[in-house]
Amino acid sequence: MLTNKQNIHTALSPPEKISILLVSPHADDRSALQQILQHGAWFISLCATVSDALPLIRSLSPPLVICERELADGNWKTVLDACGACTHPPLVLVTSRHADETLWAEVLNLGGYDVLLKPFDRREVTRVIGMAWRHWFGHATKQPVSSASPNPMSAQYA
């Protein structure tokens, strides 16, 4: 039988690799984010458009989606809406080269998690993504799991 201390440790231990979906057509943003996160517990899936992102959001069930503000076939709001339909909705972080108070307010008011200014700053990216992961994980582990709903931490990280 596990002690309370062991149960708490198990509940707070992240999986080996944490999935992030990056939705951006910009190769330099993708390589910068991969370089920043290469030594962590992150696995980054990449796509360039909203139409590419929607099926990945459903199939990968990533805890975090990092999305460019504007995309060729839509924007971050479409991605946020798709995430909201998930059983355990991923947190959405919006990236922009021109982030101002208006964008931050809009993202937060519509249910996004935060805005990452580009070019990416290593400390800011790791801080925000780490906080987002802890927030999502803490929220996901508090939700009751019925026998009909899958465990959000089981198959997707195997």
Image (spheres, rainbow, N blue to C red):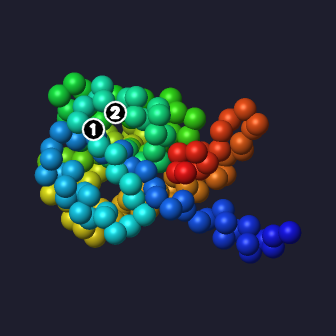
Q: In this view, does 143 lie to the left or right of 113?
A: right
Q: Are marks 2 and 1 in contact (CB under 8 Å)?
A: yes
- Whole-number angstrom distance, CA of label 2 to CA of label 1: 6 Å
Residue at position x 47%, y 34% in the image? 59
Label 1: few (<14), some or many (≥20) within 10 Å?
some
Up-down relation of residue 17 to residue 156 (above or below): below
Could you say where residue 143 lies in the image, as x and y percent from the top left? 67, 46
Q: Mark 2 or 1 closer to N-term?
A: 1
What kind of element bears circle 2? Answer: helix
Q: Nearer the viewer, residue 29 or 60?
A: 60
Up-down relation of residue 142 to residue 79 (above or below): below
Farthest-out residue, right: 1
Q: Is residue 139 left or right of residue 59?
A: right
Hey, what amino acid is under mark 2?
A: Ala
Q: Mark 1 points at which residue?
A: 47
What kind of element bears circle 1? Answer: strand
Residue at position x 52%, y 33% in the image? 86
Could you say where residue 142 lies in the image, as x and y percent from the top left? 66, 52
Could you say where residue 126 lies in the image, as x and y percent from the top left? 33, 65
Q: Name the residue under label 2.
A: 53
Label 2: few (<14), some or many (≥20) within 10 Å?
many
Q: In which quarter of the image is residue 57?
A: top left
Quadrant showing the N terminus: bottom right
Residue at position x 74%, y 75% in the image? 5
